Amino acid sequence: MVNVSQETIKKYSEKYSSVCVDKNQIDPSLYEEYGVKRGLRDKSGKGVLSGITNISDVIAYEKIDGESVPCEGRLIYRGYNVIDLVNGFPKDKCQGFEESAYLLLFGSLPTEAQLAEFKEILAGCMNLPKNFVKDVIMKAPSNDIMNSMTKSVLTLASYDEKASDLSLDNVLRQCLSLIGRFPMLAVYGYHAYNHYDCGESFYIHRPDENLSTAENILRMLRPDKSYTELEARVLDIALVLHMEHGGGNNSTFTTRVVSSSGSDTYSTIAAALSSLKGPKHGGANIKVVEMMDDIKANVADIHDEAEVERYLSKILNRQAFDQRGLIYGMGHAVYSISDPREVIFRSFVEKLAEEKDRQSDFALYSMIERLAPEVIARERRIYKGVSANVDFYSGFVYSMLDIPLQLYTPIFAMARIVGWSAHRLEELINVDKIMRPAYKSIVSEKDYIEMTNR
Ligand SMILES: CC(=O)SCCNC(=O)CCNC(=O)[C@H](O)C(C)(C)COP(=O)(O)OP(=O)(O)OC[C@H]1O[C@@H](n2cnc3c(N)ncnc32)[C@H](O)[C@@H]1OP(=O)(O)O
Ligand SMILES: O=C([O-])CC(=O)C(=O)O
């Protein structure tokens, strides 16, 4: 075996990363010259149209006198405004997630009997293969629960004799089983990390088939399985708000791209998880909370608006926090004036903060919600407005439910698996064509040079 130390490999990578930069830099003006669109961020605001969906609608503009003007954001699941869904679910039951999952997968609101049957099927899916926790989840635990879930999802393929069968009933069966299993993969992954890396006790509570998804998440998470009705209801609403967001968001688009290649459900969903964890997408909910802690640690007086504003400018200028130049929880590819999910979170977060004695944190969140769009607009090229997105308050809400930071993005995934499933089915039903966009090449051809002449 060749004996090369890790240090040598590290030094080689450091040296050659600058070679990579040298050889890969593309003149930014070429993007404009060739009309490249990476999404909705262009002057026309239209971006690239790459599909048609009947699952949901994300509305940020309306036509007034033939002109498209920004409006308050609206999110529509199969024709129903998500705000009406959240307000309409029976207040004495905690099953908004199950009702919305049925709606998104099958296209209409369930009757009582249909919902009861659906819940029974999901309960039947809430199990893992024998020894899966020991053999897979507890092996090589890490604080990155999204990676742990991805590993588990890929391994589940080995337990499925029909893993690569693309017939629709089989794909639906696989999707339902992943919807049922996701809370277990995430929560048990967290317990493994908490035990091995943090020295805490290890316990595995099985889900209770009579409880809803939100209730089961809390039951499996807590050492004594206990939770309040309010906690379960808040988590249920959070799940509903995260379930679906059109075909173009990065993780759902990943689902559609990978599905279009004919890949199996496990590989497709593993790819979607890998996309969602990115800090510009679902991973932002962890980043927001870390950013808030950083602000509290570095701003002497967090009640002083001018001081907070100066620190936000430093974050934008890559001089503070993670030096990526982003204020997390702000901005959106589609919404400009408002993200309706953030509006719903905001509507109950103040009351929750009062109950949990977190008013001073709430005050800082509200101040940043107000200041950040102004700071971003001042320092960036903005074609449309920037406002707080769904990830802004979600982590704060989870922290008030005593949910650990490592599970914030996994909770997003436990909800979004439903949207991914609906889009995978829609892609397979309608389009039997691989997605393959074009890339403008700026390579110039060269003659091969013999080794001795280089
Ligand atoms: C569930 C979700 O995925 S919601 C989004 C969660 N992500 C975050 O909260 C991370 C912070 N936000 C962002 O990175 C961005 O707003 C995104 C990725 C969500 C959208 O990005 P875009 O589509 O490029 O947004 P938009 O067209 O409005 O951006 C215009 C400019 O403002 C900048 N901008 C937008 N939001 C932010 C932000 N939060 N912080 C700093 N700059 C920002 C963009 O980088 C861009 O500047 P540039 O042209 O100099 O590169
Ligand atoms: O639509 C987007 O680009 C991101 C988003 O809000 C989501 O996926 O929920």
Image: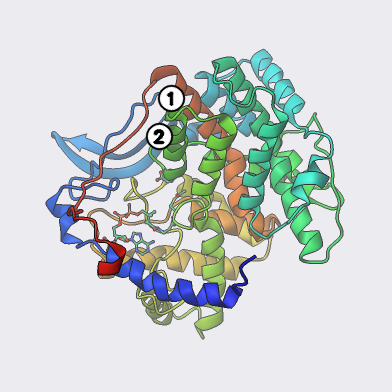
Q: Is mark 1 within 8 Å of ligand 2?
A: no
From mark 2 to mark 1, how far is it between C-alphas?
10 Å
Location of mark 2 (residue) = 247
Q: Secondary structure at mark 1?
A: helix
Amino acid under disc 2:
Gly
Query: How would you rate the neighbour count of disc 2 (Cα within 10 Å): few for under 14, some for 14-19, many for 20 or more?
Result: many
Residue 307 to residue 58: above or below: below
| Residue depicted at x 55% and y 39% | 416
Residue at the farthest front position: 452
Query: How would you rate the neighbour count of disc 1 (Cα within 10 Å): few for under 14, some for 14-19, many for 20 or more?
Result: many
Q: x and y percent of residue 69 in the render?
A: 21, 43
Q: Secondary structure at mark 2?
A: loop
Q: What is the number of the mark on residue 349?
A: none
Considering the image in quadrants, where does the C terminus appear? bottom left
Amino acid under disc 1:
Glu
Which residue is at the front of the view, 292 or 346?
Answer: 292
Give the side of residue 93 with respect to residue 71, left or right.
Answer: right
